[in-house]
Image (cartoon, rainbow, N blue to C red):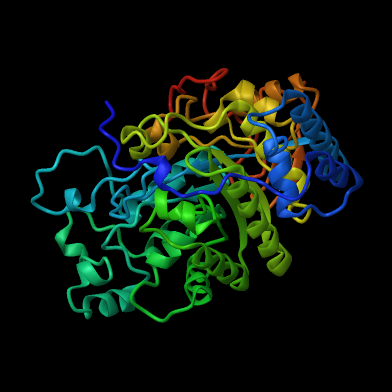
Amino acid sequence: MRTEPDLDPADFGFREPSTDQSFENALAKARDGVRLTVDDATELLATGTDTEGIDPVRKEAVLELADRRRAERVGEAVTFVANLNNNVTTACNTGCLFCNFKDSAHAFEAGSDADHAGFTKTPRESRAIVEDALDMGVYEVCSVSGLHPAFALNDEHHEILAAHDDPAKTVNYVPPSQYTTDPGTYREQIAAMSVGGVHLHSMTPEEAYHARRGTEWSYERVYRELADAGLDSAPGTAAEILVDEVRDVICPGKIRTDGWVEAIEGAVAAGLDVTSTMMYGHVETVAHRAEHLGVIRDLQDRTGGITEFVPLSFVHEQTPLYRQGVVDGGASRAEDELVVAVARLFLDNVEHVQASWVKSGDAHGLKLLTCGADDFMGTILSEEITKRAGGAYGEYRSFDDYVEMITAIGRVPVERSTDYRTRRRIDPADGPHGPRLGPRADGTPMLQGGAGDDGGSPASADD
C-alpha cells in the first residue's frame, strides 16, 4: 500500500533532454566506429530528443548496430559464471529510497523488540556457506551488504571510531557489543569467505567508504588490506546514476559521484579488477544515463581495470520510491534494450556487457543478448537484494538452463572465470552440465533442476 508521496517529481528540477546533435548523426558516427559523445548517447537512448517516446524503427536500427558491434568485438560466445551471493547483513541506516534490502540497524541491537526479517552473519557462518558452495562447484562468491554500524575495517579502526565524540552520530559507529550478532570486521569477513581457492568479489565503493569512515585512510589502503585478507575483485555497484542531482533524490545519504570514482580508482591501484554498473529506470532522464556512461568510460580510460558493464533495470514494487508515489514503475523493455545497445556502442573500452535474468527474466534477458550483451550473469544460488525490491524471476539458474537458453538463440555457451581470463566452451550434447572451472568442480550439476523460464525457485536454493 503506497503512502502519500513525500517527494514530487516536478520538484526535481531536471532539465528536459536536448542536444545540438541529431539522432541520424549519432547513429552514423556509431556505424562508422567514431567515438561517441555524451550527446550522441543521449540521442541514441532517446531515439531522438526531438520527439516524445521511443521510435520503434529508430530503436531497431540502434539494436541491430549494437548486436553487430558485439559480434565483431567478442564473437558469438555467451558467458556465465558459477557463483553464489553471500550478503553478510541487512542492517543499514543509509536510507536509500530505491532499496528494500536494508533493515534499520536499531532493530538488530540487543534488547530490541523490533520485528524484522533481516539478518547478520558471523564470519564463521559466512565461511560455512562458502565451503558448502565450493562442494557444489561454485568458484565465485559475491558479497554485498548493508552498512552495519558495528562494521569496521579492522581492530585499529574500531579504536579510532570509538574515540570519536558521539560516534553513532558523527561516524555511524556503534560497538559490536550492543548488537545481538557481531558481524566481525571487514577484514575478518573477507578472510572467512576467501577459502578453498574461491574468487571473492566484494566491497563496493559504498562499503569501502564505510570501512574508512572517521579516518584519513585512502581507498587504496583499504582495498590493499582487504586484498591481503583474500579479496580478489571489487563490484562497481552503489553507482546507481553517477550524477549528483539524481543521487540527491534517490540516495542523498550515499557516497557522491566523485567519491565512487575515487573508490574504484583506489581498488584498481590496489591491484584489483573491478566492474561497473548503472541502476536506471527511476527518476533519471536519458541525459543522466548518457552522462553516467561518460563517467564510466572516462574512468576506464584512466584505469583500464573495468572488466564489464552491468545495466541494472530498477525493480520498483517494494521500494520507498514506489510506496511514496515518487515513481509509478521501472524502465520499459524498450528502454532496457536501448541501454544495453548504447552501452555496447558508447563504452568502446569496456569489453563485456551483461544481461540480467534476475532483473529481466529469462525471455527478456535472452532478448538483451541480441542487443549488444555477451554475458548472462551466473548461477547466483542466493539473491536477496532484487527479491526484497519485488523481483519475481527466481534466484538460481543451472548450467543446463544456460546451455538450453543460449543455444536456443544460436549462440555459444561458455563457462568463464570472474575475470573472463579463463573460459570453457560447453558442448550442448555433452550433458548433464555442471561447472568445471572451480577448485572442487568436476562437471556435476550444482543442484537438481533450475528455475525454468521467467521465474520459479530451485528446490535447494537457500535464500
Spot occupied by residue 436 in the image (x, y as percentages of width and height):
67, 39
- Please identify the quarter of the rendering in which residue 79 is found: top right
Q: Can the viewer see residue 430?
A: no
Q: Is residue 425 above or below residue 222?
A: above
- Please identify the quarter of the rendering in which residue 261 is found: bottom right
Q: Can the viewer see residue 367?
A: yes
Question: Residue sitting at 77 percent across and 21 percent down?
Answer: 429
Q: Is residue 432 left or right of residue 389?
A: right
Q: Is residue 179 above or below residue 153?
A: above
Spot occupied by residue 24 in the image (x, y as percentages of width and height):
83, 39
414 and 268: which is toward the camera? 268
117 and 21: which is toward the camera? 21
Spot occupied by residue 352 in the image (x, y as percentages of width and height):
72, 46
Q: Is residue 277 left or right of residue 160?
A: right
Q: In the current view of this chain or complex, which residue is farthest to the right?
A: 32
- Please identify the quarter of the rendering in which residue 22 is found: top right
Question: Residue sitting at 56 percent across and 43 percent down?
Answer: 285
